[in-house]
Amino acid sequence: MDLSRVRELLESKSYDKLADLCDGLMLQVASDGIAYHDEWPYSIHLLAHIYVHDINSARFLWKSIPSSVKESQPEVTAVWKIGQRLWLRDYAGVHEATRAFDWSQDLQGLVAAFSELYTKKMFQLLLSAYSTISIQDTASFLGMNEDDATNYVLQHGWTVDPASRMFTVKKQPIVTEQKLDPSKLQRLTEYVFHLEH
């Protein structure tokens, strides 16, 4: 079983392509009748689905993993804890699950990239959902301690009221680009002219 392409994607940090590659390889190996369960990189495959926010595929993969693999490879179970926290929308628990395990060399980069991506996603969620939010809640959503969370949001233009321990969220301006294509303007002019005459 050749997993060199998986290694290449891990080394090049092309994590968004990893889940599809693993799915394809698993189907290919299974259709060839090769016994793969003992040496399949389930932890990488599972985390790759989580990385691209495909929790349903991660759940189905988890259910298909043999019990013997789940028992003999604690890293697979640790990855699934991240998936469980996402499924339950336990935002702080996701960060705890990423920090709670001593990840192998193969997974350290992928876990770090997922954690960074997830923090950015949570920050965008806070931007869209809140106008004010407590320091404690912000730290919980971002998976940071209160000082780090304060520094993080202040760098993004938020303001803090030390008396109430609340942040005021600075909404990002919505930028919409309208490109005026001369051909569209010409068609609109012809259409209006046709309606008037």
Image (tube, grey):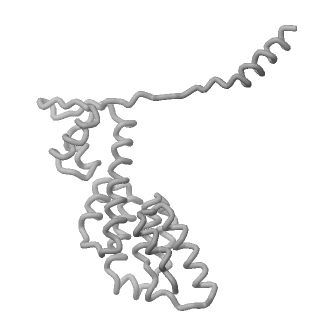
Q: Residue at x 23, y 46 (%)?
A: 139
Furthest toward the right, the residue is 197
* 10 over 85 or under it: above or below: below
Q: Residue at x 11, y 29 (%)?
A: 163
- Give the number of marks: 0
Give the position of the C terminus as an image quadrant. top right
Q: Position of residue 46 (x, y in %)?
A: 44, 71
Q: Is residue 103 left or right of residue 15?
A: left
Q: Nearer the viewer, residue 123 or 176?
A: 176
Q: Residue at x 32, y 72 (%)?
A: 78
* 190 over 176 or under it: above or below: above
* 94 over 194 or under it: above or below: below
Q: Nearer the viewer, residue 178 or 157?
A: 178
Q: Position of residue 175 (x, y in %)?
A: 47, 28
Q: Position of residue 55 (x, y in %)?
A: 47, 62
Furthest toward the left, the residue is 163
Residue 147 found in image quarter = top left
Q: Residue at x 60, y 26 (%)?
A: 179
